Amino acid sequence: MSQIDKPYLDNELHKVVHQLNQEIDRLAFALKLDLSNHTFLHQFLIQEIDREHDHFHKRETLKGLIVLRGKISMELTESGQQDLPSPIHESIYQLLRVEQSN
């Protein structure tokens, strides 16, 4: 990879992570999940969801996106790069913020 490619790839990564964060925020809002409640979020990620649940697909999608975002964060950290802003640091999160987890 040439040095010219690196800024382009960094910019693309920023855009992709930003879009990923926004989608996480939107789904969390739709499901009334508070992303800043780390205890609840951990429970949400490890708990099995009943396939008959009304929001099964949204919940599974959100779980997958959160796991993907976590893997990106780990990869950046392991490669010595600074992590990018998390979903709770996006402006859309501040607009849609859910104070209470259900």
Image (cartoon, grey):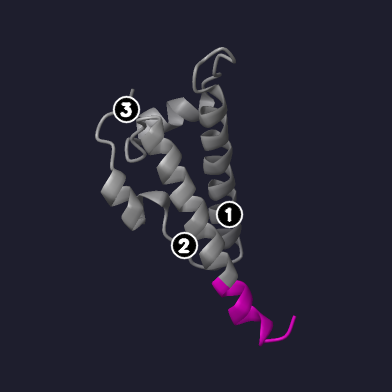
The stretch in magenta equals 1-11
User: What's the residue type where badge 2 is placed?
Assistant: Leu
Q: How far apart are marks 1 and 2 (CA)?
A: 9 Å
Q: Which residue is pictured at 58% across the width and 38% down the height?
A: 64
For the N terminus, the image quarter is bottom right
Residue underneath mark 1: 72
The residue closer to the viewer here, 68 or 19, is: 19
Residue 6 belongs to magenta span? yes
> Which disc, if any, is residue 84?
2
Q: Which of marks 3 and 2 is nearer the N terminus?
A: 2
- The x and y percentages for residue 50 are 55, 14
Q: Which residue is pictured at 48% across the width and 59% down the height?
A: 18
Residues at circles 3 and 1 in contact by the CB criterion of under 8 Å: no
Q: Distance between the residues labelled 3 and 2?
A: 25 Å
Q: Residues within 10 Å of mark 2 (few under 14, many from 20)?
A: some
Q: From what the image shows, is residue 10 above or below residue 61? A: below
Q: Which residue is pictured at 58% across the width and 54% down the height?
A: 72
Q: Is residue 95 left or right of residue 68?
A: left
Residue 41 belongs to magenta span? no
- The x and y percentages for residue 44 are 46, 27
Q: From what the image shows, is residue 64 above or below residue 72? A: above
Residues at circles 1 and 2 in contact by the CB criterion of under 8 Å: yes
Q: Which residue is pictured at 54% across the width and 22% down the height?
A: 56
Q: Which of marks 3 and 1 is nearer the N terminus?
A: 1
Query: Of the residues tagged 3 and 1, which is closer to the observer?
Result: 3
Query: Of the residues tagged 3 and 2, which is closer to the observer?
Result: 3
- The x and y percentages for residue 35 are 37, 39
User: What's the residue type where badge 1 is placed?
Assistant: Ile
> Which disc, if any, is residue 101?
3
